[in-house]
């Protein structure tokens, strides 16, 4: 993975998140924010990032990560077809639908880099 | 300057399961839009995925079929996060970091030359839905979620391909083994096989790779070949002008026969992969791989080679006889029952293959049982019926009436050959006696008159005389007179 | 007789003796809700009609002498992030304001099958993200003990409904303390079962590797009964454990002799309110007096729990909440130019600020260049936190701690100091990170009359020992159980920039 920051993003090295970074992640998360909101979140995200930098105190060499807390394996289902929802149930609560399809705004050309 | 293209291929095939990868919805093709969905594949709040055992088994089968050196011991799943209207969860459950298998290979053949193409990795994942754009409404996309959660196998090749023909051969070889092993039906028209080649071009002899572009929207092998050829030419054109190729995803326009960059500017991807907490890992011990290897059908290359050496048939015949496991089994059953692989192959290549092409023959449920076809071949060999009559009259009759025995058919159609030498000799004698002038001319050297005599005998016997015996008799009698 | 004050056993006996009908009970609870919920705001949706219909069914069963489930006719409230078929399931969010699921969560289906009467859907911090119940699109919940104070969160609606007599039982959920902490602050009982004990199918995901549905009640016995109904393997949840569920009732013996209770010293460090500390220490002494052996233990990585939790929970949340995109269901903003605009405006207007903050933090810690430094490191420290518990449970049967460092605080007090709010989660988050069960039970009141909670943490799938100890304490504790007076009008505060 490429680094977004020269220090490789190590927490603690540069704890304050910039407005551009907030803008970038707001875009990744598809949240439209005003400049005032960007600043509001920047302060709060900065505080928490500063706080979590305490994890750098710990030696984690040779420690395996935990992604699943209870060890279970091979939970599989048989390849059996079960009834589906009716079309009405499936798309009846869509904000917009037509002729059995869900309707979404068409994607148009945008500058999607996210960083202004 | 001479250029060289470097081509890699990312292929997705639909795994042959009845239900989706994480839910029980059907994977059947052609359903009405949004009728094969449930809370799980619609990504409704609170719904959870449960992995389909068959999808894992088919993935493993593919790993064995494509001779992967490395099959992961604990298969785990990850979320690939991105927003798109056809992706209702906002993420795709796929594999990341530790794909199902790596380092496989497949042999291809182009103009008689063999070449091995490396497979970088195989992984299993879910498909997304389908977006439909209607011409009249430029501001709306219509979404059909039926395909969401259909199990896919991703097959990524090494950049070992060099020409459009090699790319075509690679896809054909891949499709053949995948279909053969029952991993996928790989029907491109049904979206069960999709491929996205990536292409770069460099001056021959250079080590460094050029800038890659990716091709999308290819719905047939022929289009893949054409699009790659187009793209190679485009790259060379750019390089010749001293310009730089820009990294892009190119869309193939079949009508215009050209590729152009995707209109939507692509995002600098940041998929934020992380382990899927909703699924457990799957342990794939060596035992399972060994078991799957043992159960794997003989693959087409091996089968063709065995047919050529074992039955003494031509490679072209072997290709047809081994075109699918069902056809191959049928061929072998016929060959064994009639004792003549060559004749059996001729029948498969000629008569059976055209019946298949005409839609009169289902390879999975042959209308004429192998033993019956073998019996017919024996009748021809024994001279009870002529080869032409067997092909043009007896076989079609058997095709129409599946229970019909070849012997019965021959008799019912009145096609049994006269092979009784004594009876034929009497006819031959009568014909010779009735044509003294022609006999004299024949004996003076007009040997082509033999055909005339044969014709006379056939007329007398209403075409049922065994031509081989008639020939022999006539030659002897006319010579000895 | 106040029907709303009765426990499951008493209601069941009255029903079976036909002293009262299920419809009487249902009616009594809706009357109580009408009387107090304008002040408490515990419910988002009430299901009066459906509840009466269900009560009628139960009465018919009683009349025909059918065998009854122990929960038949018993009122239950369901936290509004648990799916109920055909009934709004808002998650406390605008983005799901009109959303009606097509299916019941497994826990809800089991309640229905047991003929429990679902009164309504309870308020919560939006998507379970909060510890004060101030982050709900449907307004804050008030603590029945002081309507100007928070009930805790995120299952604040369920806890407050129990404390105010607006239900007999309630489902909560617990991702980082959301069942135990409000139970503690409202003076009721709440258990977060072992991860995998209760199916998550139909629990709207916040952080999938931490979420569990919790059982809440006013007594240990009722809580154990509720858990025994909703627990057990579910093939629709791959992380649901295929283990038998013990009959918890058998462990409510009052006997704790021979059990070893560990007191982790890191849980009694600075920042703990002295009254809370003394109530909890008294409770531990009381258990020692009953014959349990109390020993000091250490969980050295406790101080990292909140940091790990913030990274893991937000990362998973950022992904889980991506599905709210205005396409298939839920809220869609009206005013947009294109797809990108629809997405970002819908999500901006549909989510509250606390949810947005967590989604952004989660997206950040998973993004290219930061994954290893934040998310992966957190998952590794998580392993160390798990190991702490494993080592402790090698020598003790359970751990006793405060549920929360302070009594209920004032509405609005910590609204703009989220870090302070998160830091207080220190006693709760580790159990989720390690997947172990935890229960909070009342252990007395502060001088001002606010409840204090005792938290017991146990070995994986050993909820029975927690119930055993909790019950023994509850049955013999010397302080007298009270009911809140509920007479101060509520002041609403708002979440906002
Ligand atoms: Zn489905």
Image (cartoon, coloured by chain):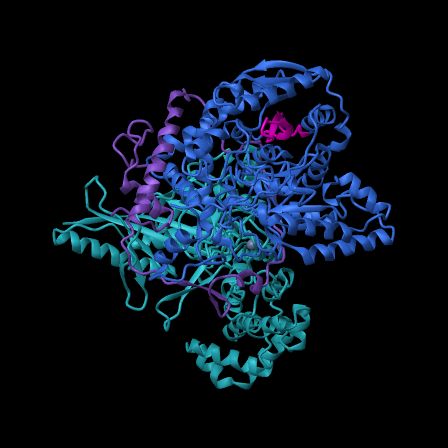
x%, y% of residue C240? 62, 39
Looking at the image, which residue is at 29% across and 41% down? A21
**Residue C95 in sight in this render:** yes
Range of residues picked out in magenta? C436-463
Looking at the image, which residue is at 54% across and 16% down? C265
- Picture quadrant where residue C171 is located: top right
Chain letter, colour cyan? B
Query: Ligand 1 is located in which of the four quadrants?
Result: bottom right
Q: Nearer the viewer, residue B91 or B154?
A: B91
Shown colour of chain C: blue
- Picture quadrant where residue C102 is located: bottom right
Q: How many marks?
A: 0
**Residue B301 in sight in this render:** no
Please determine whether, in this image, residue B361 is positioned above or below residue B235.
Answer: below
Q: Nearer the viewer, residue C465 or A106?
A: C465
x%, y% of residue C376? 42, 31
| Left or right of residue C72: residue B135 | left
- Picture quadrant where residue C456 is located: top right
| Left or right of residue B324: residue B215 | left
Task: Point out the image quarter for the N terminus of chain A.
Answer: top left
Chain letter, colour purple? A
């Amino acid at each position: 993975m490429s680094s977004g920051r020269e220090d490789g993003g190590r927490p603690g090295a540069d704890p304050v998140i910039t407005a551009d970074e907030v803008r970038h992640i707001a875009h990744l998360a598809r949240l439209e924010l005003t400049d005032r909101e960007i600043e509001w979140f920047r302060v709060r995200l900065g505080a928490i990032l500063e706080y979590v930098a305490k994890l750098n105190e710990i030696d984690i060499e040779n420690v395996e990560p935990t992604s699943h807390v209870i060890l279970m394996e091979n939970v599989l289902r048989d390849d059996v077809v079960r009834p589906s929802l009716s079309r009405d149930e499936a798309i009846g609560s869509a904000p917009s639908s037509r002729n059995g399809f869900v309707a979404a705004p068409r994607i148009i050309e945008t500058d999607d880099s996210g960083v202004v | 300057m001479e250029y060289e293209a470097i081509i890699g291929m990312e292929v997705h095939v639909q795994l042959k399961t009845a239900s989706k990868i994480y839910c029980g919805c059907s994977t059947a093709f052609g359903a009405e839009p949004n009728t094969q969905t449930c809370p799980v594949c619609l990504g409704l709040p609170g719904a959870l995925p449960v992995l389909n055992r068959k999808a894992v088994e088919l993935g493993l089968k593919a790993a064995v079929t494509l001779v992967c050196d490395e099959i992961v011991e604990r298969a785990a799943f990850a979320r690939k996060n991105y927003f798109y209207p056809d992706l209702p969860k906002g993420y795709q459950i796929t594999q990341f970091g530790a794909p199902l298998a790596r380092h496989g290979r497949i042999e291809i053949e182009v103009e008689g030359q063999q070449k091995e193409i490396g497979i970088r990795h195989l992984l299993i994942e879910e498909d997304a839905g389908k977006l439909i754009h209607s011409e009249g409404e430029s501001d709306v996309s219509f979404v059909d979620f039926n395909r969401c959660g259909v199990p896919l196998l991703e097959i990524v090749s090494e950049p070992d391909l060099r020409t459009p023909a090699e790319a075509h051969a690679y896809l054909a070889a891949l499709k053949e083994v995948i279909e053969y092993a029952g991993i996928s039906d790989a029907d491109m028209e049904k979206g069960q096989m999709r491929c996205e080649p990536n292409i770069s071009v460099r001056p021959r002899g250079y080590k460094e790779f050029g800038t890659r572009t990716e091709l999308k929207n290819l719905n047939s092998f022929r289009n893949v070949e054409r699009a790659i050829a187009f793209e190679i030419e485009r790259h060379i054109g750019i390089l010749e002008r001293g310009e730089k190729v820009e990294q892009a995803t190119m869309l193939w326009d079949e009508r215009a026969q050209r590729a152009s960059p995707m209109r939507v500017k692509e995002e600098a991807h940041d998929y934020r992969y992380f382990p899927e907490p909703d699924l457990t890992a799957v342990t794939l011990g060596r035992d399972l791989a060994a078991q799957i290897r043992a159960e794997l059908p003989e693959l087409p290359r091996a089968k063709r080679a065995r047919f050529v050496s074992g039955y003494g048939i031509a490679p072209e015949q072997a290709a047809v006889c081994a075109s699918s496991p069902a056809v191959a089994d049928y061929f072998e059953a016929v060959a064994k029952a009639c004792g003549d692989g060559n004749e059996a192959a001729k029948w498969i290549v000629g008569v059976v293959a055209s019946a298949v092409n005409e839609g009169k023959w289902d390879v999975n449920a042959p209308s004429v049982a192998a033993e019956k076809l073998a019996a017919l071949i024996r009748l021809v060999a024994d001279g009870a019926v002529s080869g032409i009559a067997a092909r043009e009259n007896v076989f079609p009759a058997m095709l129409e009436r599946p229970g019909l025995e070849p012997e019965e058919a021959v008799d019912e159609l009145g096609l049994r050959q006269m092979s009784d030498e004594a009876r034929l000799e009497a006819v031959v004698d009568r014909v010779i006696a009735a044509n003294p002038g022609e006999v004299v001319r024949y004996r003076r050297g007009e040997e082509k008159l033999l055909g005339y005599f044969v014709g006379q005998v056939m007329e007398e016997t209403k075409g049922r005389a065994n031509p081989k015996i008639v020939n022999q008799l006539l030659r002897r009698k006319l010579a000895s007179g | 007789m106040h029907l709303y004050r009765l426990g499951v056993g008493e209601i069941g006996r009255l029903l079976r003796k036909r002293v009262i009908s299920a419809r009487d009970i249902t009616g009594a609870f809706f009357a109580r809700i009408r009387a107090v919920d304008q002040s408490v705001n515990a419910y988002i949706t009430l299901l009066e009609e459906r509840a009466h219909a269900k009560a009628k069914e139960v009465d018919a069963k009683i009349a025909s002498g059918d065998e009854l489930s122990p929960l038949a006719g018993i009122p239950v409230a369901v936290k509004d992030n648990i799916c109920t078929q055909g009934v709004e399931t808002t998650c406390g969010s605008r983005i799901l304001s009109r959303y009606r699921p097509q299916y019941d969560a497994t826990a809800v289906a089991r309640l229905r099958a047991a003929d429990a009467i679902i009164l309504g859907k309870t308020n919560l911090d939006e998507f379970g993200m909060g510890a004060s119940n101030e982050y709900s699109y449907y307004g804050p919940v008030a603590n029945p003990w002081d309507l100007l104070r928070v009930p805790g969160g995120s299952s604040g609606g369920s806890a407050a409904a129990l404390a105010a007599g607006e239900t007999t039982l309630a489902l909560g959920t617990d991702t980082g303390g959301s069942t135990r902490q409000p139970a503690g602050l409202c003076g009721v009982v709440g258990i977060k079962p072992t991860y995998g004990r209760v199916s998550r199918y139909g629990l709207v995901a916040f952080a999938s590797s931490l979420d569990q549905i919790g059982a809440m009640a006013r007594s240990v016995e009722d809580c154990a009964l509720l858990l025994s109904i909703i627990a057990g393997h579910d093939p629709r949840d791959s992380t649901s454990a295929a283990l038998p569920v013990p009959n918890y009732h058998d462990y409510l013996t009052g006997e704790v002799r021979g059990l070893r209770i560990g007191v982790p010293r890191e849980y009694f460090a600075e920042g703990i309110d002295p009254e809370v500390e003394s109530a909890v220490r008294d409770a531990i002494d009381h258990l020692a007096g009953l014959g349990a052996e109390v020993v000091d233990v250490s969980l050295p990585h406790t101080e990292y729990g909140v940091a790990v939790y913030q990274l893991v929970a937000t990362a998973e949340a950022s992904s889980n909440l991506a599905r709210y995109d205005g396409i298939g269901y839920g809220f869609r903003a009206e005013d947009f130019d294109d797809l990108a605009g629809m997405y970002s405006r819908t999500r901006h207007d549909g989510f509250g600020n606390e949810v947005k903050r967590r989604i952004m933090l989660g997206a950040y810690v998973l993004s290219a260049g930061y994954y290893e430094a934040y998310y992966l490191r957190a998952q590794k420290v998580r392993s160390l936190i798990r190991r702490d518990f494993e080592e402790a449970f090698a020598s003790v049967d359970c751990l006793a701690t405060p549920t929360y460092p302070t009594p209920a605080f004032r509405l609005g007090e910590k609204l703009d100091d989220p870090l302070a709010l998160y830091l207080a989660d220190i006693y709760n988050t580790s159990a989720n990170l390690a997947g172990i069960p935890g229960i909070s039970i009342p252990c007395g009141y502060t001088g001002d009359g606010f409840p204090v909670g005792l938290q017991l943490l146990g070995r994986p799938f050993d909820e029975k020992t927690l119930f055993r100890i909790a019950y023994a304490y509850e049955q013999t504790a010397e302080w007298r159980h009270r009911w809140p007076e509920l007479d101060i009008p509520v002041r609403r505060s708002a979440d906002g920039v």
